[in-house]
Image: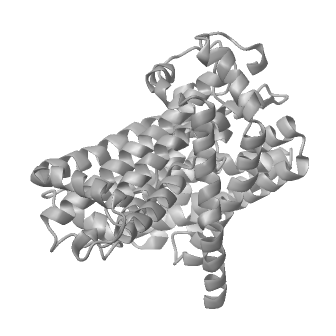
Amino acid sequence: METLTQWMRAADSFLWGPPMLVLLLGTHLFYTIRLKFVQRYLMTAFSVVVERDKMLNGNVSPFAALSVALASTIGTGNVVGVATAVCLGGPGAVFWCMITGIFGMATKYAESLLAIKYRVRDEKGEVHGGPMYTILRGLGWRWMAVTFAVIGAIAVMGTGNLVQSNAIASIINETFAVPNWISGLCIALIVGLVIVGGLQSIAKVCTCMVPLMSFIYLAGCAALLVINWHYLDDAVLLILKCAFSPKAAAGGMLGYGFMLAAQYGVARGLFSNEAGMGSEPIVAATARTRNAVRQGLVSYTGTFCTIIICTLTGIVIVSSALAHPELVNLGDRSIITQNCFAQIPYCGKYILTFANFAFASTTLLGWFYYGEQCVRFLIKKESAVAVYKGIYILFSFLGALGSLSLVWDFASFANGLMVIPNVVSLLLLHKVVTAETQKYLWSGRQAENDPECS
């Protein structure tokens, strides 16, 4: 088992190495330039998020689809991942994580637009979409569409299930000393009760939980910024200095340099917002929308939200390390966020515990829908979906019971494999994305209905 873990870790490190970073970041830059910095329409996008129009075609509202996507994207990895980037790459990693997210908004826009453009309607009148349908209908490559769906269904069990239930059980055990098997039973029961209702049930829970968990976590970050306000200027300046320092300076937190800051900041930025991975377009395709461009705009607001969370987390860590170097040590990334939140009197650890619990719980629900749609694409039988639900519920219990280092490495490897077919389709279908953007966004006609969306 130890040998297998080492092999999987090596494979994962290779896959997420420089070639993958170049592929993803290159795609982000390509679409940012090709779409004339589509990020500038952010305020228009937020106005579309809150719009309600039940006469449009789709399964859920744009806000509900965004909530499910955010539930899946905003997880413990955003918090722990940023801490890891800062510890390994230095304070400058925060800047590069933010920049990568900003460019990633263009890719998220493009893949969600294509998901709407190539979605399908089943015999019950429900719509389905995602990279597998984009690849099949846009490129005609069934083999690659099937490959993505198979990899997606497998990755869901790791990233979206086992590691999340394990994180929840560990958090509850550390804070309240509840045995993991009891937490596992409760997790399985809750997951089963929610997912049995399908997307509508998942969307209702996520629509309530996502704003709440985000507000509580951001309120905790705001409290820490107030506590350490004397060091905020120094923290921001240090982040910028380390981000552009041509070489590592001697001693202290400047002992990292540009290369490490860029490497870990870009890697964490690419992984945390999931732009280019192909997961979020699966739920974006179900949204009620007048045209594909509007849902593309809605989807990239989710990436913007992850940028805010990751950036604030990074500033909190750096400012806390400056204010309390004896408490917040960048050399110990496993407990760095806990030590930061310990500065909040009485309730700091409970704020972080609730945030991590909520992040992991909603990720469990959101990723189930991704896996269900992959299975539905592969095997168009309700019995197969029912079996998948049962397995998912069982795994949510098993994940709470033990160490999952091998599962995490495998899930990360599978996530990397999802990127390749999705990004290939994005690059090959760039003319479709540009044409839709020209037709509806650049011409100021984004409020018009597109008959093809019906």
Residue at image point 58% right, 43% down: 29
Residue found farthest to the front: 246
Viewer-side residue, 189 vs 23? 23
Q: Quadrant of the N terminus?
A: bottom right
Viewer-side residue, 124 vs 100? 100
Q: How many marks?
A: 0
- Residue 210 higher or lower than 339, as above or below: above
Residue 162 location, x and y as percent? 57, 65
Can residue 127 be seen in the rendering of this structure?
Answer: no
Residue at image point 76% right, 52% down: 421
Viewer-side residue, 111 vs 48? 111
Q: Quadrant of residue 287?
A: top right
- Residue 245 higher or lower than 373, as above or below: below
- Answer with left or right where residue 142 lies relative to residue 433: right
- The chosen color scheme is one colour
- Residue 449 higher or lower than 292, as above or below: above
Residue at image point 66% right, 75% down: 11
Residue 183 location, x and y as percent? 45, 65
Residue 341 location, x and y as percent? 23, 60
Residue at image point 44% right, 45% down: 306
Q: Quadrant of the C terminus?
A: top right
Residue 101 location, x and y as percent? 48, 46
- Answer with left or right where residue 178 lies relative to residue 402: left
- Residue 198 higher or lower than 189, as above or below: above
Can residue 406 be seen in the rendering of this structure?
Answer: yes
